[in-house]
Structures are given as C-alpha cells and as structure tokens.
Amino acid sequence: MGIGKLVVIVFWVTAIFNLFAPLAEPMGRVLHIAAPAMLVMHALECFFFNRRFTAMGKPLSSSDKWMVIVFGGFHLMKLMKQIPELNSGNQSGNNKRA
C-alpha cells in the first residue's frame, strides 16, 4: 500500500469519527463538506473509468469498483498499469505513418 492510500484511509477514518464525535470548528465543518464531495468524485471516477475499461474489454470487478470509490485515482493508477494496451504506446493517436 502506498503513502497515498494510507493518507486516504486516515481521511476516511477521520471523517467517520467526525460523524460520531465532531471535531472542533472549522475542521469538523470542513470534513462534513469534504467527505461527501470526495465520495461523489470517487463515484464519478468509478462510473466513467468502468465505462472506459469495459470499452477496452477489461471491465472492473466489484472489488475494483469499491477500491476506486474508497481510494479514487490511487487505485486507478494501479489498474492503468495492468492494461498492456495503454503501456505499449500503440494508442490510436500515436502511430502516425510518414
């Protein structure tokens, strides 16, 4: 697990803790706004990247979808490295003929 995922875990644990034992202002209010916003952004990432991976013939598994919702781009970076078509440089715009 990378440092980015560790930071995200700390964020989510703090956000959940803030629901039951509110932190001092302004941090408590910031978490009440930031956590739902982050959840929505990660859900949108999951939706759009699932469509992209499905179009490439590699749909996301249920566990990958949940990991994207929790970790967002940090998990997506791991998934992108696993797709050989993206790493080989043979994308449609990159092979121009002379």
Image (cartoon, rainbow, N blue to C red):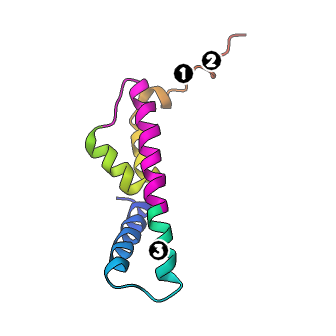
> On the image, which quarter does residue 59 sit in?
top left
Separation of residues labelled 3 and 1 (CA atoms): 42 Å
Residue hosting label 2 = 95
Please state which of residues 68 and 95 is positioned toward the viewer in this rendering. Answer: 68
| Crowd rating for badge 3 (residues with CA inside 10 Å; few <14, some 14–19, many 20+) | many
Quick check: 32 left or right of 21?
A: right
Q: Which residues are magenta?
A: 37-60
Residue hosting label 1 = 90
Residue hosting label 3 = 31
| Residue 80 visible in rendering | no
Q: Are marks 3 and 1 in contact (CB under 8 Å)?
A: no
Q: Position of residue 28 (x, y in %)?
A: 46, 81
Residue type, numbered disc 3: Leu
Residue type, numbered disc 1: Asn
Q: Are marks 2 and 3 in contact (CB under 8 Å)?
A: no
Quick check: 48 left or right of 66?
A: right
